[in-house]
Amino acid sequence: MLVGVVGGLSMRWPAACHLPVTQRPRTTVPQSTGSEWDVGGVDVETFLQSEAWLNGALALDDDLIVSAAGEDDELASELAQASQQYDRLLLRSPTGTPTLARSISLEAAVLSDGVGRTDRSLSAHTAAALRAYALGLIEEDAATPCSDGFSTVLSERAAPGAVQTRWDIRLPLVPLVEAALAELLKPGTPLTVALERVAGGLEAELYELGTFVSQPGAAAQLIHADTLFSDEPCLFTATVALQDVREESGPTLFLPGTHTAEAHAAFDDDVDSFFDSQSPVLACAPTGGVVLYDSRCFHCGGPNRSEEPRALFYFTFRHPDARADMLGNPAARTMRAELHGRFCLGDLLG
């Protein structure tokens, strides 16, 4: 996931390298059995119940998880500020932070608020298969932090020296991912109609394709926008809940209406006053629900206080008018190299 503007801290990018994409066999690519999917010969339900990837699969060697002292200091500062920002925004509403309501018009919500939600866009069995596949990729690459299959991510660990608890996975275009895209991008659905209108039409480029995972215990992120502000629209990202996303799961916190020039100017001028003027919402959603947002809208991932991983499949389209110098840090672009520039929205419509 790209990150362009971050609140309260100069940007820190993890030192992990990002090598060119290499083709290698994956043992966890789910295979369709008609109406269901299985993972490496194990049905999805059994895989999710076992959660084998959490039982030691993520135990990395000390030399892989302990960073240099300077990086640990920066991470500690980042985590402290992120926690303060998140708690401060939650306290804005004495009756609790509201959840993002399902949009009557997804297009209108994204244009006016920078974010909107629609439900029942992906079937439960495809969502479960994608979730299992993503968790399997983390298990396979647990001991290889320089893997080409991952992007940089804010608050990747919940404390200096701790194991990683957040991942941004660059997905290969395996049949399961193709099937999910075809299911989500059917002509005439609220999501497809909104994307075509806000992202610049059928020529909008597929710019990112990934899955975001936060493990139980993951910390909150700093408030950020995915791109720098520009008057021209940049990127539009659809995140898809691969399980029910509840408040304890650490849903994305959005600041509606902050995709504007005025909001970014206020953010740059005085972050404290900016926060005090906001009415945050939490992007809770049922399995298969979609949140579509403008990359200029401020948001952050919340702390995962549940006992289950939170996984969001996502894809981003680049508006034809987007300026390359406004698109954020290229190291954080969640797209495998062999997929760069290959598809536009019109190519993917089912």
Image: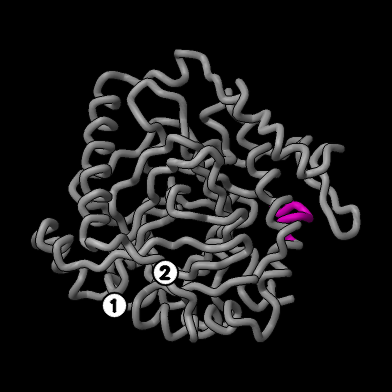
Name the residue at 64% across, 82% down. Answer: 189
Name the residue at 71% across, 32% down. Answer: 50
Q: How crowded is mark 1: few (under 14 residues within 10 Å), some or many (20 or more)?
A: few
113 shown above or below 93: below
Q: Which of marks 1 and 2 is nearer the N terminus?
A: 2
119 shown above or below 251: below
Image position, residue 118 (x, y; %)? 54, 74
Q: Is residue 50 left or right of residue 225?
A: right
The tag on residue 286 is: none
Q: How crowded is mark 2: few (under 14 residues within 10 Å), some or many (20 or more)?
A: many
The tag on residue 231 is: 1
Q: Mark 2 points at which residue?
A: 100
Q: In the depicted view, which residue is nearer to us: 255 or 324? A: 255
Image quadrant in which you'd find residue 70: top left
Query: Mark 1 touching mark 2, by CB under 8 A?
Result: no
Q: Is residue 171 magenta?
A: no
Q: In this view of the protein, can residue 322 be seen by the observer?
A: yes
Q: Give the range drawn in magenta.
A: 173-178
